[in-house]
Structure formats: structure tokens, C-alpha cells
Image (spheres, grey):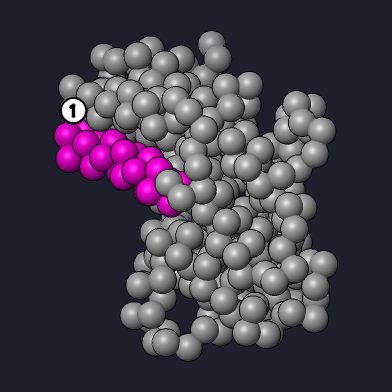
Amino acid sequence: MLGKTANGLFWMFRYLERAENTTRLIETGQRMALTRLDSTDNEWRSVMQTAAVCDGYDAAHDEVTKDAVINWMLRDKDNPASVLSLFSAARQNARLVRTALTEEVWEAVNAAYMKVHDLLARKVNERDLPEVLSLIRRRTALVRGATHGTMLRNDIYDFARIGTFLERADNTARIVDVKYYVLLPSVSSVGSSLDNVQWETILRSVSAEGGFRMTYGNTTDPRDIATFLILDKRMPRSLAFCASKIADNLDYLSHEYGQTPHSFDLARQLQSDILGNDVDAIMDFGLHEYIQKVLGALRTLGNQIEIDYRFYE
């Protein structure tokens, strides 16, 4: 399956994952702001920088406020990366590749769009925000469940999975980078109780708190958390886990089509670059610098996949 159908599937699942991940970034910003006594609305600029939506916001707004940022990222139709816009794009792509989806997957996507459209029809107040974010994530989980439970394990499924894990790896890297940006003005906070609370917030935002406790107990050590989110191959949102799944599904496509394109080599290189480091090497290199390197590699890989599988032909 080359061309527009592959493109539609790949981006449909990227949009759904990105919508869920945007809710996680909003939640991360909200929780981190609550842990800082000197919290300012400028912290929300850090969240937008991490989500790469600053330029559009600045063009539409004169100042940064928490309410305006949340509204921009969650439901503003002028923001193509808002949650509402992303669900609309995912549904449109699902319509374009309707015959490649099972009835259950199509119904799950369509129902998710309608529910999110209703939830975000008006501005979300701060009291309702946690429940709204949770409901959106549950809707994307239903789409994933329908996909895993009903889709044939063929190239259609492979493109869906590659799109999902490219986006998920990008998100985990960005959420870890939120921590860097939030603490950047206060280097003296590193290693403090505030530092530990914010790392715990990172864990909760990627649904990793329970798994971390099972692995490391009740202690909160930033190096352990970084190890878990970057290098632990059992954690389904870690960079190592996502890189492994991307490489596996590109391998399946190579066997399906009888050729090994350049994107496969890039995926294996990404995997070895992530797993080829221990946490000490990452910290010595610089966590922020390391994350930026990973994000660059993910962008390059995504672009190469589009070229190799002729998405726009």
C-alpha cells in the first residue's frame, strides 16, 4: 500500500495521538504551575514552546495568560494543532481511507470526534478541565482498542502503528523537555523537593507513575525517572519502547513489499542511539540537548517514511 491511502492512515493515527498528547502537555503545565510558589503565566509559554505552537499564538494574542493558552491549545479553530482541530483532521483522514478501516474503528473515530466536538463547543473552565482532558484521552483509547481488536495485521496496521509511535515518542520527549524549560529560570531548584514533585508530575502525565513505583519503589530519583521514560523498553511511552515499535513495523513493511528503504535504516539508527546510551551519558551530554537530538531524528525519520512510501503521489 503506497501513496495516499498509506498517507491517510499514517496521519490519522498521528493526529489522534497528538490530540491525546496535547491534553497531556496541558495537564503537565497545569500541575507544574500549581507546584511553584512564584508561578507566572510565562510558564505557559514554555508549554507552548514545547508543543511548537508559540508562533501562531503570538500572531493571535497580545499577551500570554493561562486561560488563553489552554483555550488556544484545546479548542481554538484557528490553531491547526488544537485538540479540536486534530480530531477534525483525524476524522477527515478516516473518511478518506474508510474502506481500509474496520467498521469498529470508523465508528470509534467518528464517535470520538462528535464527543470531543460537544465537549469543546464552549470554553472549558478550570474546574472542569481535568475531567475534560481525561474524557478526551478515554476516547482516543477506545480508537486504539478497536484498532488492536479488529484490524488485520497487514500493511494498513503497520502504517497506523508507525504513525502512533512516532507521535508518541515525540510527545514523551517534549513532556520531559517541559521539565527542563520550567526549571530553567531556577537552576537552584534542581535536586530540591520542588524538583522531585515536578518529576512526579511528569510521571503522572504520561501514565507512568504506577509502573515506576513497581520498578523503583516509593523513592523519587530524577535519574531513575529519566531512565524509565527514556530507556525502559517495558514502559509503553518510553522513547526506547516507541523506537522499538517503529523499527519493528518498518521491518514488517520491508518484508511485505520486498524492499528495505532508507527509513528502515534511520529507525534502527534511532533505536541504537537511544539504547546505546545509559542515563549517565545522557545527563553528561545534557538532557535538553539529548531530547533536542531525539526530536530532530524523529522529524527526519517521519519525513523519510513519507518519501519512501510515496505518500503524495
Residue shown at the point (73%, 52%) measured from the top left: 41
How many other residues sit within 10 Å of disc 1, few (<14), some (14-19) or many (≥20)?
A: some
Residue shown at the point (70%, 71%) measured from the top left: 37
Report helix, strand or loop for mark 1: helix
Residue shown at the point (70%, 76%) measured from the top left: 283
* Residue in front for this viewpoint, 241 or 261: 241
Residue 169 rendering spot, x and y as whole percentages? 52, 51
Three-letter amino acid code of the residue under disc 1? Glu
Check residue 183 for magenta coloring.
Answer: no
For the C terminus, which image quadrant? Answer: top right
* Residue in front for this viewpoint, 49 or 135: 135
Residue 271 shows in the view: no
Residue 62 rendering spot, x and y as whole percentages? 82, 33
* Residue in front for this viewpoint, 114 or 101: 114
Residue 270 rendering spot, x and y as whole percentages? 58, 54
Residue shown at the point (22%, 36%) measured from the top left: 146
Q: Quadrant of residue 40?
A: bottom right
Q: Quadrant of residue 138?
A: top left
Q: Quadrant of residue 232?
A: bottom left
Residue for badge 1: 104
For the N terminus, which image quadrant? Answer: top left
Magenta region: which residues? 129-152
Residue 52 in the figure: left or right of residue 264: right
Q: Main secondary structure of the magenta part?
A: helix
